[in-house]
Image (cartoon, rainbow, N blue to C red):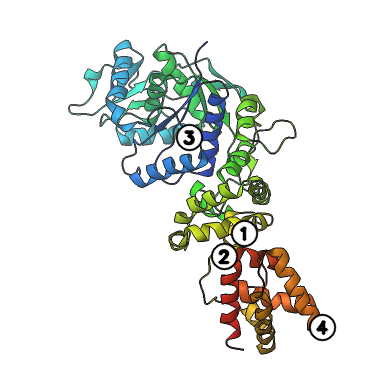
Amino acid sequence: MTEIVTRFAPSPTGFLHIGGARTALFNWLYARGRGGKMLLRIEDTDRERSTKEAIDAILDGLNWLGIAWDGDAIYQFPRAARHREIAEHMLASGAAYRCFATPEELTEMREIARREGRKRLYDGRWRDRDPSEAPVGAKATIRLKAPLSGETVIEDHVQGRVVFQNENLDDFVLLRSDGNPTYMLAVVVDDHDMGVTHIIRGDDHLANAPRQKHIYDAMSWQVPQMAHIPLIHGPDGAKLSKRHGALGVEAYRAMGYLPATMRNYLARLGWSHGDQEIFATEELIAAFDLPQIGRSPARLDLARLDSLNGHYIRQSSDSDLLAEIERLLPHIAGGPELAAKLSPGLRQRFMAAMPGLKERAKTLIELIEGARYVWSERPLQLDDKALAILPADARTLLFELLADLDALSAWDASSTEQAVRAFAERKQSKLANVAQPLRAALTGRTTSPPIFDVLAVLGKAESLARLRDQTQSR
């Protein structure tokens, strides 16, 4: 049985697009589920727009998502000599020819074809002419000699049977006049040389499929199986753009989504498996198949993403969440400063706070914000709402509470709650009238995890120190 080989082939001209990440995931799932390989090819032939920063962003994004490719990444540009070799081979076999049409002639051909309503823009004027007829010094491109009649059929795993009329397909350029290969040629040669058996890519490439099949046929190469997946649209049904929000994977990481969430969410964008919504990665690998991909564009739904991320946060162990937070910190504002504070003691506090924090957080950013009281330094900066519930009489109340808390020999949520309740009863006050100022003094805010959990997480020394800070100015 032939080994399944898929590939993800991004152009390094920017970040790893969310649509590209889904394409990579689909290739990875399909190969992994069948004991095959997924290869990574960086299509860096556009030298002006390809950058090292973009390459790094693509590799980093894939690594963060947990999409591991097999072997080393392959770069397309250094393979130009191989691409030229194949173009010359097709020229020698009669499957291609030299074209000496000038830019002005090509422009005129396109204009005439459009006026006449023809899809074939190149009129084939050099298809059967002898190169000796070319003007002296003229530079030639090499064009494929495409079939003039009949049809080219693509049996697509997603789109079904797609038929292209050959009369509408040009003799397209394989090798430019400067000797550089075109995208169309490079892709086919690379896919063949890499042993790719299945091409899974966006349906914006469907129009390329018949032309690429013509190259395979001209070389008597096996045509890979193809699956062209619909693009991702925004919630309004329009093509995904900046106005819909984040487009790059790195932005979703910075917003605090977990890699497992993104794998699950992206897999379900356009692919279904019964009514199941939540999948462990192993379940995705076992269940994923191409016929279950719909033909209609998937719509981005951030509310669903938030809900799914909240589920994964609640299901994650506290230690795993802390590790994910530490991975995230270099990528968010203020993160490096917080990372520098993460002493063993602060990590221990984070771990103690995590059970309460993760029940209400939908993102890691919300987790970090919810834990602000854990890592904030003294004296605590109180927000306006917290200041409003700490007038002089409330500070005096907390000053009196200090003695009761200081007298505790055991310090946990239960013992501190008993002490605060007893204090409120002695003062003939409602518990909330003590707990809310206590929350403001300890966290700097009016909302937080349960206040007695906060006391337990901070510990006796830190809790009392924060209360003293706020009661000295009563």
Q: What amino acid is found at the position of numbered circle 3 in the picture?
A: Arg
**Residues at badges 1 and 2 in contact (C-beta under 8 Å)?**
yes
The one of 455 and 31 positioned closer to us in this rendering: 455
Q: CA distance from mark 1 to mark 2?
A: 8 Å
Q: Earlier in the sequence, mark 3 or mark 1?
A: 3
Structural distance between the alpha carbons of marks 4 and 2? 31 Å
Rendered position, 263 above or below 141: below
- Examine the rendering and report whether any part of residue 444 can be seen: no
188 displayed left or right of 155: left
Q: Which residue is mark 1?
A: 353
Which residue in the protein does label 4 denote? 428
Going 65% across and 84% down the picture, which residue do you hit?
Answer: 399
Are the residues at dot 2 and dot 3 in contact (C-beta closer than 8 Å)?
no
Residue marked by disc 3: 114
Instruction: Identify which amino acid the numbered label 1 is placed on.
Output: Ala
Residue at image x 64%, y 30%? 283
**Image x and y of residue 11, in percent:** 41, 38
Q: Which mark is residue 239?
A: none
**Crowding near the residue tagged with mark 2, few <14, some 14–19, many ≥20 C-alpha atoms within 10 Å:** many
10 Å neighbourhood of mark 1: few (<14), some, or many (≥20)? many
Kindly indicate whether the residue at mark 2 contacts the one at mark 4 (C-beta within 8 angstroms). Answer: no
